[in-house]
Image (cartoon, grey):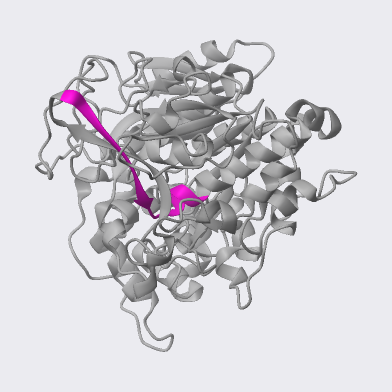
Amino acid sequence: MARSRKRKRSRSARVTTLPAVPPPDSRNPRLEAIAIVILVVPTESPLRTLARVAARARLSTWRVESVSERQGEFELLPPRRGRIPPPGVAWDITYRLRDQPEVVHAEPLFVYEVPDLYRRPVRRAAAGDGDLPATANNFEWSLENANVIAAWSLFGSRPPGAGVTVGHPDTGFTPHPELADAGRLLIGQGFDFDDDDPDPLDDLDDGFLDNPGHGTGTGSVIVSNRGAAVGNNNPEFVSGVAPFASLIPIRTTESVALFSMRGLRRAIDHAVAKGAQVISISLGGPLPSPALRSAIRRAQEAGAIVLAAAGNQVGFVVFPAAFDETIAVAASMITDQPWPGSSRGDAVDITAPGASVWRARVERSGESGFAFSVTRGSGTSFAVATTAGVAALWLSFHGWAALVQRYGAANVARVFKTLLQQTCRTPAGWDTHDFGPGIVDATALLQAPLPDEVPARKMRDPRRAAVATDVNGLEAIVHLVPDAPRTGLEQAVAEMLHVPDRELPRAMQEVGDELTFQLVMQARLRAQLEARAKQPAGRTRRARMSGPPLNRATMSARLAARLRGSRR
């Protein structure tokens, strides 16, 4: 996971190409901060309480960043000088914090990549591999399938998307002609949380698992001017769903497979602070984070609609899409069939065109710096960008301020999500369990009357509700291993932690989120658990799970003791 600092340069300068596959890096995962929520009492400043807690945990030299002082939310950052604690030590520190009475919650925030998850076999179909022939020279097929072009006509003389700002946490931007309208590409409002500087320019690093130009591509699907010329000899073009909306590019990562919980949390809070009414997230990872979920809730309370990609090439919906507060978007093809590479499951809220979607592409090119083109791309990244554009159209059509006045800022997203699902197209034979009620229909959405009252909040189904209200990490493991029977999985987890079934909830309350983290980071451990969970119910189980040695360096002393069958 070697990451170079962004080489600041002019936007036409040439940058040296990195190796395609860097050497192994022992810093994966790497601690960025520890998120902490403390009790707020009227008789003491939250910062004073936090200082006392940090001193007891031997963290007096750590830096403090306020996230929401009013609610007692902070982050503790390692000292600028000194060694960053390895993952096992970070978990030990977290437990020391959790053991203190003033602490409501504490969690380590890692930046991590899990390449093995993106190599798992998934259900594929030949029609879903590569660029679909039916989309050749059909530059607006995705808009037609989502009924966007007809929706534009409902605006009359008003520009579709005008007055709405979309926050866009991604890999940053490049000065592509499809994003050339500087008045709507709000570069000055953006930020680079990957390198901590104000310039959200994508440095186009193309190392292992990097996605250079990803933010430019997804951003073009949201706001590109219809038919913007790329060059005299290149007739291809991109039509953005909300061509008159504004976009705040926020560089959050170099790769959609490299996930920084802290980086995305900061990006969401930044988008809200800059007035974004829609936040489009084409990123995701396998681990839930209460700190990230809290940021999404703050965004909703401010009146923003938060949407996230369901994920690609994995067997479950990634986070933050899997949170109930977000709108999780799966991908479909031009045939109105689900894209085989799309994540699926009961966490999916809606599906949108995402396979062979025309989007802006940028690459390095000799001394001139950039080579611009328009090509096709596939993934739930483009499906969520399409849906985010539809959200911008809906807000523009009704007026965000009018919706806030009518329903209250915190309820705008709920009204939108309800209407989005009620007005979607449901093709014949559609799998509503795995891909939501259907495919986005922008025209039907805009034509639908606004409800008199805020719709009741509903969970998608009992399993989805369990994930949304998970208190001990067990549901996160069930979500992570969707093909294993639940009973077998519970038994396998209890066996792994050396506790009887009746004591499993208490053990998971103690170490459940770290166990989930270890299952994600240690592929062999996850495979062992899944295989054990799939054993026939009548088969005799051994008292101790045998299997590969564990990487103790990533593990806390508390969890290691549990896995050994002893208690500290």
Q: Closer to the camera, 384 or 366?
A: 366
Decide: is 43 above or below 94.
Answer: above
The reply to whether residue 266 is visible in this rendering is no
Decide: is 237 above or below 177.
Answer: below
* Residue 457 percent coordinates (x, y): 75, 50
* Residue 194 percent coordinates (x, y): 33, 26
Decide: is 298 above or below 543.
Answer: above
Q: Residue furthest right?
A: 452
Q: Would you say residue 373 sits in the magenta stretch? A: yes
Q: Closer to the camera, 184 or 426?
A: 184
Q: Residue at x 56, y 65 (%)?
A: 435
Q: Residue at x 45, y 68 (%)?
A: 482
**The quarter of the displayed image where residue 527 is located:** bottom left
Q: Residue at x 64, y 37 (%)?
A: 392
Q: Residue at x 45, y 35 (%)?
A: 228
Q: Is residue 402 left or right of residue 346?
A: right
Q: Which residues are magenta?
A: 368-383
Q: Closer to the camera, 3 or 213?
A: 213
